[in-house]
Amino acid sequence: MLSVMREVKNFFEISSETGGFSLAGGKIALKDKYKAGQYILLSGSLLANGVYKIAADENGVYTLEGAAVDEDWSGIVFGLAVPPDFVALCAEIKAFNDNPANAPSAITGETVKGHYTWSKATGANGTPAGWREVFRTRLQPFRKMFTGVRV
């Protein structure tokens, strides 16, 4: 999701808190109030920068899905309000990227007479189309000119 947010220059940030943070066992204590299912963005960390979904709230101690490292750092935590349509589009992009048939390839066309024909989707410059090209029009409504988030 982070790479897609960077591409559209939109992190859907609605709040931020600055300070010292500790991520341990996938849990982080935060001053601001967040909800289970909401996304947050950790910034300023050496190993844990990224977007995480809050799995649970235990009185201000939040369990983050996919947080695999333990670290103490000073930085910023952004509260995000990511639209469900954007979350679904990110899932489609991940599925596209995970499909080996969509891996970049030098093959742009091949024909063996009477046997088979093979071609690869290409971008405007003739190179294989990646997720940015394939999903460009669907990403457009989420684009911003500039972002205030540095990740």
Image: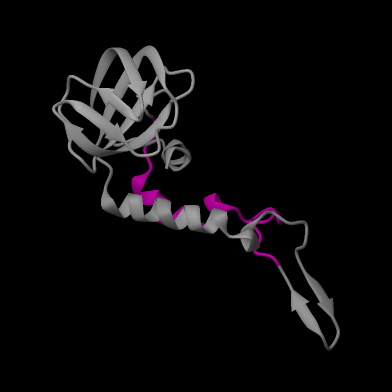
Residue at the spot x=39%, y=22% of the render? Answer: 43
User: What's drawn in magenta, residue-wise?
Assistant: 120-146
Which is more toward the observer, 67 or 126?
67
Q: Position of residue 91 (x, y in %)?
A: 41, 54
**In this picture, is 83 found above or below 30?**
below
Which is more toward the observer, 134 or 33?
33
Which is more toward the observer, 16 or 98?
98
Residue at the spot x=13%, y=27% of the render? Answer: 59
Residue at the bottom extreme, as displayed: 114
Magenta run includes residue 130 = yes
Q: Position of residue 19 (x, y in %)?
A: 28, 11
Q: Position of residue 124 (x, y in %)?
A: 64, 56
**In this picture, is 50 found above or below 143?**
above
| Residue 14, visible in the rendered structure | no
Q: Position of residue 62 (x, y in %)?
A: 24, 30
Residue at the right extreme, as displayed: 113
Q: Would you say 108 lies left or right of 70 here?
A: right
Residue at the spot x=41%, y=18% of the render? Answer: 71
Magenta run includes residue 15 = no
Q: Would you say 12 lies left or right of 33 here?
A: right
Question: In the rendered image, which quarter contains the N terminus?
Answer: top left
**In this picture, is 72 found above or below 54?**
above
Which is more toward the observer, 46 or 10?
46
Q: Quadrant of residue 67?
A: top left
Residue at the spot x=40%, y=50% of the render? Answer: 140
